[in-house]
Image (tube, grey):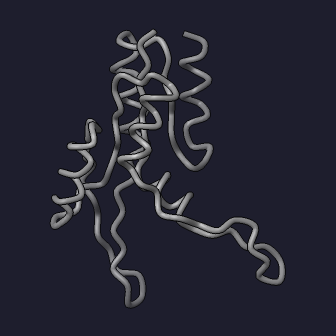
Amino acid sequence: MKVCAFIDSQNLNLSVRNSLKGKNDREYYTGWKLDFAKFFIYLKDKYKVEKVFIFIGYVAGNEALYTKLQKAGYLLIFKPTLEYKKGNKIIIKGNVDAELVMHTMIEFKKYEKAIIVAGDGDYHCLIELISKL
């Protein structure tokens, strides 16, 4: 069975990195840094994934990261980023939701099973659709 994975990199990274706190600052979850190379191996070993697409906002100066991901085996799909100022901070946005959905459908006839990796429910409608096709 051919299996492909589609990863929202920023969404996944932020969801594992950020700690979750409740009332009185009680920590329910301690964030950690994801090792993307080990995660790739995990997907290959556990789910027999043949292709792993990772969707990421392109930021000039991060070429070493992109090379590292490619060497690990990821197929990178870039989204141009937007910069804007919020107070004194510069915010960089590279929302990849539409690209992930589009590529999942472009590749649809080339896989039998898709693994969507994200940290929220943004892709629920995509999962419902491909489950019915």
Query: Which residue is at a point 36% across and 22% down the rendered structure image?
Result: 50
Q: Nearest the camera: 6 or 103?
A: 6
Q: Residue at x 35, y 12 (%)?
A: 110
Residue that extends furthest to the right in the rendered view of this protein: 23
Out of 124 and 4, give the one closest to the viewer. Answer: 4
Rendered-image quadrant of the C terminus: top right
- Tell me the residue at 22%/43% (across/down): 70
Residue 65 x %, y %: 24, 58
Q: Which residue extends farthest bottom? A: 88
Horizontal side of residue 1 vs 131, given as left or right: left
| Image quadrant assignment for residue 127 | top right
* Horizontal and vertical percent position of residue 132: 60, 12
In-image side of 132 versus 39 (left or right): right
Q: Nearer the viewer, residue 36 or 78?
A: 36
In this view, the residue in front, 60 or 85, is 60
Task: Indicate the quadrant where residue 40 lies.
Answer: top left
**What residue sits 47% from the left and 63% below the top?**
33
Residue 96 picture location, percent across and down: 38, 47
Name the quadrant containing residue 84.
bottom left
Residue 36's x, y, as percent?
Answer: 38, 50
The relative height of residue 131 versus residue 68 in the rendered view (above or below) is: above
The total of numbered circles placed on residues is 0
